[in-house]
Image (cartoon, grey):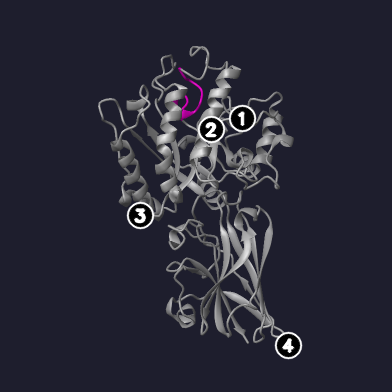
Amino acid sequence: MRKVLTAAALAVGVGLAVPVTATADAEAASTVTYQASDAVVANPQRGFYHHTETHLRADGSGWTPLQESVLAGYRSEGITQILRVVYLEKFADTPTLDADLLGKLQADFDAARDAGVSVILRFAYAQGGAWPYEPPYGDAPVDVVLSHIEQLGPVMRANSDVIAVVQQGFVGLWGEGYYTDHFVADPSNPGVVTEADWENRNAVVEALLDELPADRSVQVRTMLSKQQLLDVPSGADSAVTADQAWTDTPIARVGHHNDCFLASPDDFGTFLSDPISLDQEYLEAETAYVPMGGETCNVNPPRSEWPSASAEMARYHYSYLNRDYNQDVLNSWGAAGITETAKRLGYRFVLESSTVDGSGQSAPTVSIDVRNDGWAAPYQPRPATLVLTGSGGSVEVPLESDARSWMPGTTTTLTADLSGVRPGQYSLALALPAADDTTADDPRYAIRTANVGTWDAVTGVNVLGQTVTVG
């Protein structure tokens, strides 16, 4: 169970002063309203990320391990995640990974966990050099890729608590699926992908889905990649629906990343439908339920400027964006635009009010209103819990709600019936911990609401400034 404080500590010891308006009626209903914060809130699996990469070349050179102190410094910037691109040059021609690589990966994940940071993970075999790019590019054939994914599966599963999402990777330069020696019929003409090539690409996505836990997603580089995987046309009617969301199915577990966001009318070949509006409508519908992120890569006014950029991040439910690239694009947004983006990427939950009804009786009820001011909802499981701390001990009451369903621009009402709680007087808090056992007790992986004076950084709960007596 998560560490919780005594009622006295919640009221006095941690020094929390919840700025609220409280009212009570003759029937003992107590309502508290909360003040929204204007600050950038560092929360897990959302916001800007920093790019990191490492290599294991044929001669063994190129590996740059993650350092806990550096990652902790990112958290001090309000950044809680990194993109980690792992280049496997040494293994492009061999199906067998060695124990040294797997040990290096484990050390990276340990550093991330110790720093309280999540990892957006991608594997690749080759980077592009100077333009124009010409074959051979250096990536691996499909049988080698599938063998590597099978060997990487145990280390990914063992560290899924700090893996935000896995990008398809593996295919082509940078793992972005284009300039490839093996996943097109003619490497000198990489834009022509045959049915057999799509079968090989689909096999990579399916292998990753098989190796990852059922509640982790794989992101693909173009909408066409997912459409080919599922054999569906473009358009909103092909997108994942609310009934399909969060199930252990490919349609629910495959998301998207756009690493040329805003670069051109079709984002350098990201939107491939004819007309382009079909992919746009498809992505808008998809990303209500699957993870979306990426990076900017080219100055393209007016589309790359703030009014258009912010509208598109909202439309496509962006959860994360590269803070390191492209600086010319990001700088065009101005300080206010960057701050707004840091606030609204992903989810931004704001406590509006809470009400305790029937305090002193045997079955009081509690309701909490939470608004999402972000551009997306969480894409990993996120259980909501009411934490009661007081004379009857410490109690956690599930609120029977997953924050993945708290959609942008909506207010969700959470309710709890306390009839099963032993008699006593309790202070109340809202907890949104990580769903993984290994990080559930770590407040750095818990969600903090964007309110003034409610966050308890020691226990990772949002203090409601309410007390209830169970009679």
Badge 3 density bin: few <14, some 14–19, many ≥20, Cα 10 Å: some
Q: Which residue is mark 2?
A: 205
Q: Which residues are magenta?
A: 170-181
Q: Amino acid at mark 3?
A: Asp
Q: Are marks 2 and 1 in contact (CB under 8 Å)?
A: yes
Query: Which of disc 4 and disc 3 is earlier in sequence?
Result: 4
Overall secondary structure of the magenta stretch? loop
Across and down, in percent, residue 74 comes to 39, 50
Q: Are marks 3 and 4 in contact (CB under 8 Å)?
A: no
Q: Is residue 75 left or right of residue 104?
A: right
Q: Amino acid at mark 2?
A: Val
> Rounded to the nearest whole Å, what is the CA distance between mark 2 and mark 1?
8 Å
Q: Are marks 3 and 2 in contact (CB under 8 Å)?
A: no
> Rounded to the nearest whole Å, what is the CA distance between mark 1 and mark 4?
60 Å
Q: Is residue 170 left or right of residue 67?
A: right
Identify the residue at image location x=62%, y=55%. 373
Q: Secondary structure at mark 1?
A: helix
Q: Secondary structure at mark 2?
A: helix
Badge number at residue 229: 1
> Rounded to the nearest whole Å, what is the CA distance between mark 3 and mark 2?
30 Å
> Rounded to the nearest whole Å, what is the CA distance between mark 3 and mark 1?
36 Å
> Rounded to the nearest whole Å, what is the CA distance between mark 2 and mark 4?
60 Å
> Rounded to the nearest whole Å, what is the CA distance between mark 3 and mark 4?
50 Å
Residue 83 visible in this rendered orientation of the protein: no
Q: Which residue is mark 4?
A: 26
Badge 1 density bin: few <14, some 14–19, many ≥20, Cα 10 Å: some
Quarter of the figure with residue 136: top left
Badge number at residue 114: 3
Query: Which of disc 2 and disc 3 is earlier in sequence?
Result: 3
Q: In which quadrant is the C terminus drawn? A: bottom right
Q: Secondary structure at mark 4?
A: loop
Viewer-nearest residue: 275 or 445: 445
